[in-house]
Amino acid sequence: MSLEGNKAVVRRLFEAFNKRDLASLDDLLAHDYVDHTNRLRGLDDVRKFLTTLIKGFPDLLMTIEDIIAEGDRVWVRVKVTGTNTGEFRGRAPTGMKSMYTDVHIFRILNGVIIEDIMVSAHK
C-alpha cells in the first residue's frame, strides 16, 4: 500500500472513533491487532476498551494534528479532549475536562492496522 493509502487508513480510524462507529473497526484493524500501550489483542478487546472509554468520556474527540508515513509505519500526533462524566475503570466521574496530546505509531499491512503503540503527553 502507498504511504498516502496508509495515512488514509489511520485517518479513517480516528474518524470512525469520533463518529462512534465501532463497526468500522472490522475494516480498519487486523483481527489479531495488538495495542501495546493498553495491552489489547484482537478486535473484541479493542471494542470493550473503546466502549468503556466512551462511557467514561462521552464527548471524547480525537483530532489529528500531524501525520507522517514511512514504509509500513504511520506516526500521528493527536489532540484529545473530553469530559469525564461517566464511570471509567471503576472510578466515579469527576466532571473534569481533559485536553492532552497523544503520539501513536501504527504499523499497517495489506491496508489494515496490525499494531499500535502510544506515548501520551498529558497537560
Image: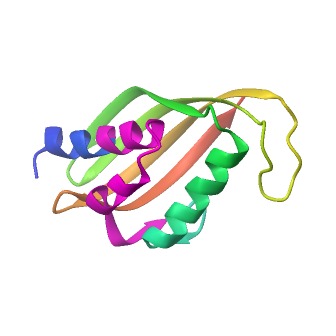
Which residue does the image show at 37% across and 36% down from the upper left?
A: 15
Start-end of magenta stretch: 11-36
Q: Is residue 30 left or right of residue 64?
A: left
Confirm whether the magenta stretch covers residue 123: no
Which residue does the image show at 34% across and 32% down from the upper left?
A: 67
Q: Quadrant of residue 82?
A: top right
Q: Position of residue 83 (x, y in %)?
A: 73, 30
The type of colouring in the image is rainbow
Q: Position of residue 99 (x, y in %)?
A: 67, 26
Q: Is residue 8 visible?
A: yes
Q: Quadrant of residue 52?
A: bottom right
Q: Is residue 36 visible?
A: no
Confirm whether the magenta stretch covers residue 28: yes
Q: Position of residue 118 (x, y in %)?
A: 53, 49
Q: How many marks?
A: 0
Q: Is residue 91 left or right of residue 37?
A: right
- Taking depth in this image into account, of 17 and 23 the one nearest to the observer is 23
Which residue does the image show at 15% across and 43% down from the upper left?
A: 5
- Taking depth in this image into account, of 1 and 81 the one nearest to the observer is 81
Q: Is residue 105 above or below residue 40?
A: above
For the C terminus, give its image quadrant.
top right
Q: Is residue 74 left or right of residue 100?
A: left
Residue lying at the far left of the rendered structure: 2
Which residue does the image show at 32% across and 62% down from the upper left?
A: 26
- Taking depth in this image into account, of 105 and 45 the one nearest to the observer is 45
